[in-house]
Image (tube, rainbow, N blue to C red):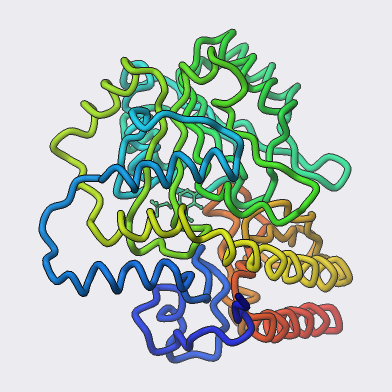
Amino acid sequence: MPFDFDTPPDRSQSDSIKWRRYANQDVLPLWVADMDFAAPPAVLAALQERIAHGVLGYAHPWPSLLDAVVEGIARDHAWHIEKEWIVWLPGVVQGFNLACRLAGEPGDGVLTFPPIYPPMLLAPDNQQRRLVRSNLVLAGGRWEYDWDGLDALLETQRARLLLLCNPHNPVGRTWSREELTRLAWHAEKHDWLICSDDIHCGLVIDPTQRYVPIASLDEAVAQRTITLMAPSKTWNIPALSSAFAIIPNASLRKQYVAAGRGLLPDVNVLGLTATEAAYRSGAPWRDALLPYLLGNARRVQEVINALPGLSCTAVEATYLAWIDCRSLNQASPQKFFEQHGVGLSDGRDFGMDGFVRLNFGCSRELLEEALRRISLAVLAAQAG
Ligand SMILES: Cc1ncc(COP(=O)(O)O)c(C=O)c1O
């Protein structure tokens, strides 16, 4: 079945956070992480069928939903989980905030790797824990963990939780088995809990890469790991607020559920309905989406890397490009591009100055226009 990513619905007058920010300005919104595409037809059909039933009473996750998630994760990621390991959540952000609560005592360290999704930088403090940062480094044109820096850091800083993002927003890396094994070695050595935010795992666009859940490395790692997943990024349904944690360790799972008791709402029935449809029937749409996103990623790379003062690494996963503007000589690259008609995310929010993040989850036409504006802005600034 063909899917049309070239002519997405017009969101300019809609409720979209992404589009409303610049509703009355000629600024193309390529910031917050949702895509401009309509959700897969199979998901929309399931939602319509559920609405047609008419009654929207309290719902409990049902057996065929659990089967769809378990089978989808086995099929897509070769990871065999049990239904009992799943804890439903209204969002992944709540999921890693909850994990921070299980990290030792108030004041204990939570290790994470900037640049990273901003709420992950805020979660430790939200939960009376202390952020321990080990910045990623650019090595040979690729973002990597700073292994030497990490060893040095751990001599003075004690952490109780490793907060991982795999694939990593915003640098687009799909962490390799070797890299994850090395992190897991540290986790064993220092007795860390691991919380891995794998919300982008269905969006590996580089066909040479493969997503590996850290919990699938071995039984010991699985026992200390909370893996967070959701259909929201892959199938573009983030406003349906449906996510889940996978926690193989029964006692950890009990603590996790207890930490959220009375605070977290149940996932709403439409979110659950969409989740089942996405995991059961969303593969053809995703199979068509990934090459489209890869084409967009390649265009971003081609244009950005040809411009003076800008560069970006290859995106292995996600629909986000992390653009290095440190040689552009602009105090705020985000503001600079905004003034030239392109709304990007500010690297500072991700814990790294001098960068912007570009969301290429949009039509090729819109992307081309944004890249044209970016090029004109850079060339004009150079000439001036
Ligand atoms: C790494 C990461 N985690 C979590 C989220 C948001 O998850 P949720 O909307 O389920 O809270 C995002 C959204 O951009 C993200 O990129």
Q: Indicate the quadrant containing the N terminus: top left, top right, bottom left or bottom right.
A: bottom right
Left or right: 328, with 367 as reference point = right
The residue lying at 48 percent from left, 42 percent from top is 71
Compared with residue 182, is residue 155 higher up or lower down, i.e. above or below? above
Left or right: 366, with 147 as reference point = left
Image x and y of residue 362, in percent: 60, 76
Left or right: 14, with 150 as reference point = left
Q: Indicate the quadrant containing the C terminus: top left, top right, bottom left or bottom right.
A: bottom right
Q: Nearer the viewer, residue 204 or 30?
A: 204
Image x and y of residue 368, in percent: 72, 83
Q: Nearer the viewer, residue 50 or 172?
A: 50
Image x and y of residue 3, in percent: 60, 77
Quarter residue 344 falls in:
bottom right
Image x and y of residue 219, in percent: 54, 15
Quarter residue 85 falls in:
top left
The residue lying at 58 percent from left, 47 percent from top is 201
Compared with residue 188, is residue 181 higher up or lower down, i.e. above or below? below
Q: Nearer the viewer, residue 32 or 65?
A: 65
The residue lying at 70 percent from left, 67 percent from top is 330
